[in-house]
Amino acid sequence: MEIKNDNKSIILGIIGAVIGAAVATIPWVLMYVYGEMILSLLAILIAVGALFGYQLFKGKVTKQLPIIISIISLVMVIFATLVVIPLLLLGRESLPMTLDNLTLLYEQDAFKEAIFKDLIFSIVFTVLGISGVISNIKKQLAEGKTAKITSGLRRNKTAKKNVQEDEVDDEEKEDNTKEDE
């Protein structure tokens, strides 16, 4: 079953998703290069960035949207881990960030072993990080909500706010009950 969206294109959406994911990958890369750690939490930003870019470029909302966001997020993390991060590591060591130096870097067994180990962790963390966003997209598609698909991050904040408001209302009711007695 395909969900109708007039005047929208999957190709434009994919271009937007790639751009959005690329921008959202920047914190991931910076944390790896300068913080020397991988955070799965930052992978959520990559999926959210891809979704935002997809919608910004007026991508057609179909049941393939979760697959598109997942693939783009994974490809972006793989590209960042295997190409962008090594180039930035070269730059951090005041070496020219060239493809020739990148090739020389990959000729080093110790580097290859370390980067591929980090790649495995990155993929696992990305899958874990984006799973909530993808699950939320699938849920909204199943409910027929196609006008504006959300990542679910804002809704959680809204839900927390509603719970807090309910707690305040309950406390006020208790106070009013005590005053009546």
Image: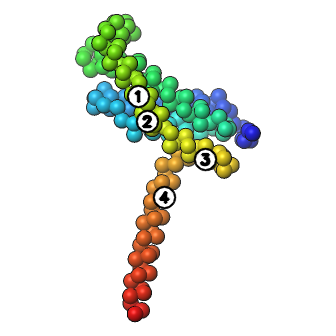
**Which amino acid, mark 4?**
Thr
Which dot, 2 or 1, sits closer to the camera? 1
Which dot, 3 or 2, sits closer to the camera? 3
Could you tell me how far apart the alpha carbons at marks 4 and 1 are, in whole angstroms?
A: 30 Å
Q: Can residue 23 be seen in this view?
A: no
User: Mark 3 sits on what residue?
Assistant: 139
N-terminal of the two: label 4 or label 3? 3
Q: Whole-percent x and y of residue 125?
A: 42, 33
User: Mark 4 sits on what residue?
Assistant: 158
For residue 91, which quarter of the picture?
top left
Q: Is residue 50 left or right of residue 139?
A: left
Say which quadrant the C terminus sits in: bottom left
**Which amino acid, mark 1?**
Ser
Could you tell me how far apart the alpha carbons at marks 2 and 1 are, in whole angstroms?
A: 9 Å
Q: Whole-percent x and y of residue 60?
A: 67, 37
Q: Element at badge 2?
A: helix
Could you tell me how far apart the alpha carbons at marks 3 and 1 are, in whole angstroms?
A: 26 Å
N-terminal of the two: label 4 or label 1? 1
User: Mark 2 sits on what residue?
Assistant: 43
Could you tell me how far apart the alpha carbons at marks 4 and 3 are, in whole angstroms?
A: 17 Å
User: Mark 1 sits on what residue?
Assistant: 122
